């Protein structure tokens, strides 16, 4: 498998092609913005109908990463569900699937803006997690200490030009903070040139695109 290793304030991390983050030293797998139940939430609120397999697809890809890496700890970096009602309405099959994945390992649910409270699922529920010099939280904080790992913005970047432009989810890092792509199916994204992301990234920021072949290129910052 093609992975890309990089350093975040001295911690050696791996950007996985799927958009998951792997920290070998701690056997820690981190995924952000699963948005489980998105199709159910949109239908419930009278929006357009999406194919109702988004949760199954997301869980299948998460299951594959867990089977491949056998993490001791899994951190879900917020917005794991599209809202709290979606968590409550989770199909029994998906709930049993999650229960199986959680069993036998430390599982941490970080609060997000879509799911700002404890979930009726196994695992610990926290506003943020500090471990080994890194701080895992859902939304990047202005002025945060180096070592912050966050999600929320679903960063994406474009490759190519003209009619051959390809937009792909990406990791975004300046060596002191890291923003993960959304792991969930049917999640949108914010371009890395957006003011919100430019304001967070320092000099030397770079994007690491997801997909079978890692692509790294400078991201405009400041």
Image (cartoon, grey):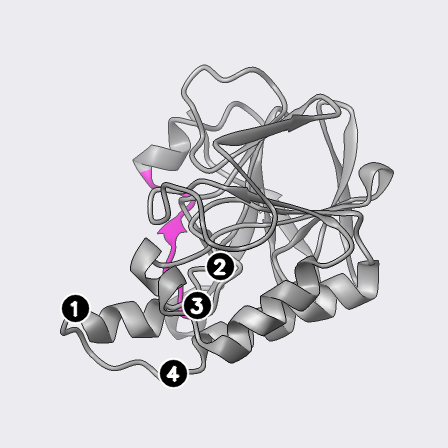
Label 1 and label 4: CA atoms lie apart by 15 Å
Binning the other alpha carbons within 10 Å of mark 2 as few (below 14), some (14 to 19) or many (20 upward) gives many
Q: Are marks 2 and 1 in contact (CB under 8 Å)?
A: no
Label 3 and label 4: CA atoms lie apart by 28 Å
Residue at 17% in and 73% down: 47
Label 4 and label 2: CA atoms lie apart by 15 Å
Binning the other alpha carbons within 10 Å of mark 1 as few (below 14), some (14 to 19) or many (20 upward) gives few
Q: Nearer the viewer, mark 3 or mark 4?
A: 4
**Magenta stretch?**
186-194
> Which quadrant would the C terminus be assigned to in this image?
top left
Looking at marks 3 and 1 on the same chain, the residue that comes earlier in the sequence is marked by 1
Looking at marks 2 and 1 on the same chain, the residue that comes earlier in the sequence is marked by 2
Residue 121 located within the stretch drawn in magenta: no
> What residue is disc 4 on?
52
Report the disc number at residue 45: 1
Q: Are marks 3 and 4 in contact (CB under 8 Å)?
A: no
Residue at 35% in and 59% down: 82
> Residue 172, located in which quarter of the rendered image?
top right
Looking at marks 3 and 4 on the same chain, the residue that comes earlier in the sequence is marked by 4
Q: Are marks 2 and 3 in contact (CB under 8 Å)?
A: no
Residue at 45% in and 50% down: 119
Asked if 177 appears above or below 24 in the picture, the reply is above
> What residue is disc 2 on?
34
Q: Nearer the viewer, mark 3 or mark 1?
A: 1
């Amino acid at each position: 498998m093609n992975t890309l290793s990089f350093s975040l304030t001295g911690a050696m991390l791996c950007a996985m092609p799927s958009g998951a983050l792997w920290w070998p030293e701690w056997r820690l797998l981190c995924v952000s913005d699963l948005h489980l139940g998105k199709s159910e939430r949109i239908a419930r609120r009278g929006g357009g109908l999406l194919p109702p397999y988004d949760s199954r697809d997301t869980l299948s890809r998460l299951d594959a990463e867990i089977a491949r890496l056998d993490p001791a700890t899994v951190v879900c970096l917020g917005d794991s569900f599209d809202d709290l009602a979606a968590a409550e309405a989770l199909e029994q099959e998906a709930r049993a699937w999650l229960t199986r994945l959680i069993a036998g390992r430390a599982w941490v649910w970080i609060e997000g803006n879509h799911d700002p409270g404890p979930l009726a699922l196994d695992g610990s529920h926290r506003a943020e997690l500090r471990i080994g010099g890194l701080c895992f939280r859902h939304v990047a904080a202005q002025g945060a200490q180096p070592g912050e790992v966050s999600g929320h913005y679903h960063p994406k970047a474009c490759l190519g030009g003209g009619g051959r432009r390809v937009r792909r989810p990406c990791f975004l890092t300046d060596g002191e903070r890291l923003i993960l792509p959304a792991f969930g199916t049917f999640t949108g994204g914010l371009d890395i040139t957006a003011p919100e992301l430019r304001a967070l990234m320092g000099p030397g920021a770079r994007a690491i695109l997801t997909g079978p072949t890692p692509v790294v290129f400078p991201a405009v910052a400041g």
